[in-house]
């Protein structure tokens, strides 16, 4: 699964990497956790232009009676996402890119879980494959939410964890974001463990275990 990640990029670098005009103002984040607002790139529902906006992390299906279900929907499995009722409509019509520059996974060692950080050497931003949804209550309150798609681990992740977030190549961004594309087989073919992005990994302090901690200490390497 992917339950924590980072984004400590400038608005200018995000705009250039994802070809968006406006990026919401936000501080550097070193421990982004579920149920928080997170920046995503999606196709604007009306104009179809790329937009960067903040969505709630934890997808709330439009038919759900209780928005609290979103806390259990932070990830969608690549293998089942086209068929699972919670995600299949969003997979066809509402795909997005979740902007990140690193993420964490935990490795079980005896009775202890050791956190590891994954990023590129130059900390370049990249896009997780995501889905978004629009939910409205009976009273008219609305929440726009999203989930991150995961797949099997690549060689860098495999020693630590058996799953990883799907990281899309920039050349696939347009296809993934295009709401008129509904070829499930071709879309699903993009949801593979990435090998083209040179990820590195290193152990970090257990300070990252608490979402209350959100500072550069979270990504500091330890021996």
Image: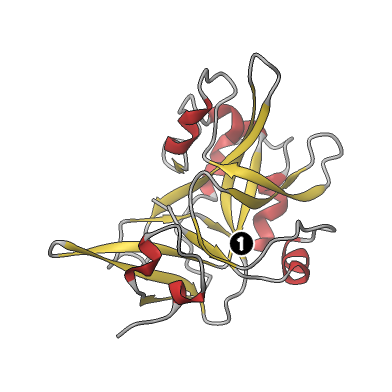
**Which residue position holds label 1?**
169
Q: Position of residue 18 (x, y in %)?
A: 73, 61
The mark total stands at: 1
Q: Position of residue 116 (x, y in %)?
A: 36, 70
Q: Is residue 196 left or right of residue 207?
A: right
Specify few, some or many for label 1: CA neighbours under 10 Å numbering under 14, 14-19, or 20 or more.
Answer: some
Which residue sits furthest bottom?
Answer: 223
Q: Is residue 201 above or below residue 100?
A: below
Question: In which quadrant is the C terminus drawn?
Answer: bottom left
Helix, strand or loop for disc 1: loop
Which quarter of the picture shows residue 62? Answer: top right
The structure residue drawn at horizontal position 70% and vertical position 46%, both measured from the top left corner, is 177
Q: How is the image coloured?
A: secondary structure
Q: Position of residue 95 (x, y in %)?
A: 64, 41
The structure residue drawn at horizontal position 36% and vertical position 75%, both measured from the top left corner, is 204
Which residue sits furthest left?
Answer: 110
The structure residue drawn at horizontal position 60% and vertical position 32%, both measured from the top left corner, is 90
Q: Position of residue 168 (x, y in %)?
A: 58, 58
Depth order, front residue of 45/23: 23
Which quarter of the picture shows residue 141? Answer: top right
Depth order, front residue of 38/48: 38
Q: Is residue 73 left or right of residue 124?
A: left
Which residue sits furthest front?
Answer: 212
């Amino acid at each position: 699964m992917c339950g924590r990640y980072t984004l400590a990029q400038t608005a200018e670098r995000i705009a250039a990497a994802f070809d968006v005009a406006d990026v919401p103002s936000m501080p550097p984040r070193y421990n982004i956790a579920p149920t928080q607002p997170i920046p995503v790139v999606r196709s604007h529902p009306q104009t179809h232009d790329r937009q960067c906006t903040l969505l709630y992390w934890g997808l709330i299906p439009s038919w759900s009676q209780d928005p609290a279900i979103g806390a259990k929907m932070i990830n969608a499995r690549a293998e089942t996402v086209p068929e699972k009722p919670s995600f299949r409509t969003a997979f066809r019509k509402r795909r997005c890119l979740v902007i990140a520059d690193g993420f964490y996974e935990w490795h079980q060692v005896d009775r202890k879980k050791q956190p590891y950080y994954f990023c590129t050497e130059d900390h370049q931003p990249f896009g997780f494959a995501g889905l978004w949804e629009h939910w409205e209550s009976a009273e008219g309150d609305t929440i726009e939410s999203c989930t991150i798609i995961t797949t099997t681990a690549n060689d860098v992740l495999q020693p630590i964890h058996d799953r990883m977030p799907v990281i899309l190549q920039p050349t696939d961004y347009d296809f993934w974001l295009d709401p008129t594309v509904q070829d499930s087989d071709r879309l699903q073919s993009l949801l593979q463990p990435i090998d083209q992005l040179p990820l590195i990994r290193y152990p970090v302090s257990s300070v990252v275990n608490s979402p209350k901690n959100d500072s550069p200490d979270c990504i500091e390497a330890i021996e």
